[in-house]
């Protein structure tokens, strides 16, 4: 149990960010930095609300969000406990490249792998609702089951996650986000279309400029529908087909 209540940072009542969102972010940070550990009993709502100068209803909004994410668990008679999250089964309807290849029993490898800090352009700034020029961690990869490139990825991560670019991106991405940052992807919004390969994409995929490639843009959200990752993939059309099954409602 966290006994040093005076060490919990105060909320900014003059900020434009709603108090329940501030409380949610502070609690998430305390759990992420292990001030609260798995199985710990959370402080009493009355004590936290008094510390932050907010109502219990406002605090409960923040706690409810973290319960939905799996960071906290409410138990009768025991109170609210810190809980270790697992990767959600809501991911079963969409897969990472790693999962796709593993399901097919096909070995794969990174032909190119780079993590860097970039400035948000107009597109990523709009997707993440941040200012253009905001620094984002970007993961670039070219992957394949052989020696020739099959797919090129660009993944941008929302700055609220707290990534520095020094994390171990060699391990499965969503496992790393869960274990290190207590962030679990739940929803995926996707846009898929055929485009003519630009000079850059053509060079990376080793095809002629203007060759048709499959472009997939995926926005990954957490349980509160807050953006986590914006992923842009370019697939060689001679090696990939996107298959969709739709059930008719009778």
Image (cartoon, grey):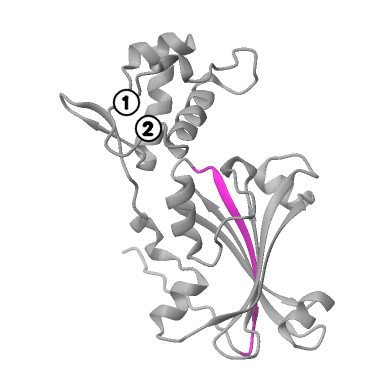
Task: Residue at 37%, 22% (x, y): give it.
Answer: 60
Question: Is residue 185 visible in the rendered structure shown here?
Answer: no
On whether residue 237 falls in the magenta region, the answer is yes
Task: Residue at 54%, 87% (x, y): give it.
Answer: 145
Name the quarter where the N terminus is drawn. Answer: top left
Could you tell me which secondary element the residue under label 2 belongs to?
A: loop
Whether residue 128 is situated above or below residue 111 in the rendered picture: above
Task: Residue at 36%, 39% (x, y): give it.
Answer: 71
| Nearer to the camera, 133 or 199 | 133
Quadrant of the image occupied by residue 73: top left
Could you tell me which secondary element the residue under label 1 belongs to?
A: loop
Q: Is the magenta stretch mostly helix, strand or loop?
A: strand
| Residue span colored magenta | 225-238
* Sequence-wise first label, 1 or 2: 2
Name the quarter where the C terminus is drawn. Answer: bottom left
Whether residue 18 is situated above or below residue 248 in the rendered picture: above
- Report which residue position mark 1 lands on: 42
Kindly indicate whether the residue at mark 2 contacts the one at mark 1 (C-beta within 8 angstroms).
Answer: yes
On whether residue 57 falls in the magenta region, the answer is no
| Nearer to the camera, 220 or 245 | 220
- Report which residue position mark 2 lands on: 36
| Nearer to the camera, 245 or 155 | 155
Residue 245 in the image, given as x and y percentages of width and height:
42, 74
Gap between marks 1 and 2 measured at Cα: 8 Å
Whether residue 61 is situated above or below residue 181 in the rendered picture: above
Left or right, residue 125 beside residue 33: right
Whether residue 196 is situated above or below residue 50 in the rendered picture: below
């Amino acid at each position: 149990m966290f006994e040093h209540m005076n060490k919990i940072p105060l909320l900014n009542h003059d900020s434009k960010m709603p108090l329940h969102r501030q409380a949610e972010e502070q609690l998430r940070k305390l759990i992420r930095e292990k001030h609260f550990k798995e199985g710990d009993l959370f402080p009493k709502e009355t004590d936290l609300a008094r510390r932050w100068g907010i109502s219990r209803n406002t605090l409960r909004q923040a706690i409810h969000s973290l319960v939905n994410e799996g960071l906290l668990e409410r138990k009768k008679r025991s109170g609210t406990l810190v809980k270790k999250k697992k990767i959600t089964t809501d991911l079963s309807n969409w897969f990472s490249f790693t999962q796709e290849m593993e399901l097919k029993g096909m070995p794969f490898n990174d032909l190119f792998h780079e993590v860097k800090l970039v400035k948000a352009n107009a597109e990523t700034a709009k997707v993440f609702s941040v200012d253009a020029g905001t620094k984002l961690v970007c993961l670039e990869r070219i992957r394949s089951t052989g020696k020739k490139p099959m797919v090129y990825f660009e993944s941008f991560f929302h700055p609220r996650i707290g990534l520095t670019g020094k994390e171990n991106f060699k391990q499965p991405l969503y496992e790393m986000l869960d274990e290190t940052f207590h962030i679990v992807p739940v929803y995926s919004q996707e846009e898929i279309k055929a485009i003519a390969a630009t000079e850059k994409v053509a060079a990376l995929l080793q095809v002629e400029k203007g060759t048709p490639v499959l472009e997939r843009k995926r926005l990954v959200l957490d349980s509160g529908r807050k953006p986590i990752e914006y992923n842009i993939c370019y697939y060689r059309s001679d090696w990939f087909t996107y298959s969709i099954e739709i059930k008719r409602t009778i």
